[in-house]
Image (tube, rainbow, N blue to C red):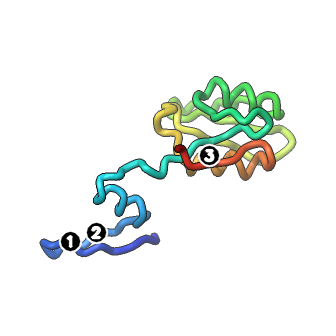
Amino acid sequence: MSGVWLFKNNGVMQLVENASDHQNESDGRRGSKKKVLVHLPTGQMVSSYGFLEQILIGLGWERYYDGDPDLLQFHKRSSIDLISLPWDFSRFNSVYMYDIVIKNPNIFHVRDFV
């Protein structure tokens, strides 16, 4: 467990895992550091799972079904890697984006949304 302990005016302390996100919320700038996944060969931002799935299949990834209705998963036969994503695209965040980048070097990049 890592983060920063913040002490509020009422004496209660709270563990904040990402202090910069907490600072943005308190300043009223929540979400100002939103990330996007970019497909480098086309320069397009990944804006749906349909687009992402199309790219991943082209790279040799296959849909993996394990019975969990909350996950969208992809497996590559040539490796032990598994990409697990939340079924709801609105919950697709930078943690999942960086997982895709690591497993597909030189194909994807995570950038700040401007």
Label 2 CA crowd tier, 10 Å (few <14, some 14–19, many 20+): few
Residues at marks 1 and 2 touching, judged by CB atoms closer than 8 Å: yes
Q: What is the x, y in percent for residue 79?
A: 83, 46
Sequence-first tag of 3 and 2 = 2
Q: Name the residue located 64 percent from the left edge and 23 percent from the top edge.
A: 50
**Residue type at the position of mark 3:** Met
Hey, which quadrant is residue 1 in on the image?
bottom left
Q: Quadrant of residue 27?
A: bottom left
SS at mark 3 in the image = helix
Between 33 and 106, the residue placed more toward the observer is: 33
Label of residue 97 in the image: 3
- Residue at (39, 73) in percent of width and height: 4
Q: CA distance from mark 3 to mark 2?
A: 28 Å
Foreground residue, 46 or 98?
Answer: 46
Callout 2: helix, strand or loop?
strand
103 over 23 or under it: above or below: above
Which amino acid lies under the numbered mark 1 shown in the image of this protein? Lys
Mark 1 or mark 2, whichever is nearer to me: 1
- Residue underneath mark 1: 8
- Three-letter amino acid code at the position of disc 2: Gln
The quadrant holding residue 72 is top right
Q: Residue furthest front?
A: 114
Please tell me which residue lies in front, 61 or 28.
Answer: 28
- Residue marked by disc 2: 14
- Marks 1 and 2, Cα distance to the nearest angstrom? 8 Å
Could you tell whether 67 is left or right of 7 in the image? right
